Image (cartoon, rainbow, N blue to C red):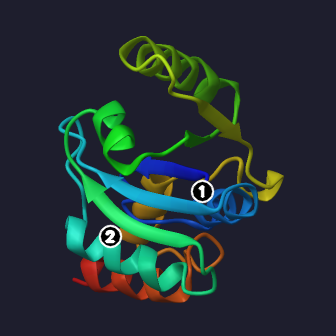
Amino acid sequence: MKIAIYPGTFDPITNGHIDIIERAAILFDKVIVAVATNTAKTPLFSVEKRLEMIQQSMKHLQNIEVDSFQGLLVNYVAKKKATAVIRGLRATSDFEYEFQMALINRKLSEGMVTVFLMPHEKYTYLNSTIVKEVASFQGDVSCFVPEHVKLELIKKFQK
């Protein structure tokens, strides 16, 4: 069974993330969407809420598992017996960072493969930070996230 891990903070999950997950689900037998704890970030949503939003967003796919992890990605990949890590590339600015991380991960775990997937061009500008900023000013985020995520953002930013 070919298992891929798609790690990220997903704070919150966006339509761009969903597009990448759907593409990965075609290529792999199983895709584990793994919410990572990033000590450099202060998330808006708890890990539990992010897991819940991802699960609700991915109900239409049968070969998706939603999980969370802490620590090194290479250790999590080994624990899950995954064959690849999925990373999304929106623009050249993403490439430099993602390329560096892929090389570090390969150095830490010789057999680790990173697969870069590009989202549909309509999502190339989209990220969770922008979504949160728009939502914080009561802007309409309905074209950026699923309806249930939009409602969670509204709850978070109601005054």
Q: Position of residue 7 (x, y in %)?
A: 43, 48
Question: What residue is shown at x 61% (from left), y 69% (from top)?
Answer: 144
Q: Quadrant of the N terminus?
A: bottom right
Q: Secondary structure at mark 1?
A: loop
38 vs 28, left or right, is left
113 vs 90, left or right, is left
Give the quadrant of residue 46.
bottom left
Disc marking residue 111: none
The residue lying toward the viewer, choosing from 18 and 92, is 18
Mark 1 burial class by Cα count in 10 Å: few <14, some 14-19, many 20+: few
How many marks on residues? 2
Q: Secondary structure at mark 2?
A: helix
Disc 1 marks a residue whose amino acid type is Met
Residue under pointer 2:
50
Give the quadrant of residue 12.
bottom left
Q: Position of residue 53 (x, y in %)?
A: 40, 78
Callout in the foreground (2, 1): 1
The residue lying toward the viewer, choosing from 71 and 90, is 71
Tell which residue pokes out farthest to the right in this image.
121
Mark 2 burial class by Cα count in 10 Å: few <14, some 14-19, many 20+: many
Question: What residue is shown at x 45% (from left), y 70% (from top)?
Answer: 65
Query: Do the residues bearing badges 2 and 1 touch, measured as CB atoms within 8 Å?
Result: no
Disc marking residue 1: 1
Q: 106 above or below 41?
A: above
Q: Position of residue 103 (x, y in %)?
A: 51, 14
8 vs 145, left or right, is left
Disc 2 marks a residue whose amino acid type is Arg
Give the CA separation, mark 2 to mark 1.
Answer: 27 Å
Q: 3 above or below 139?
A: above
Q: 94 above or below 46?
A: above
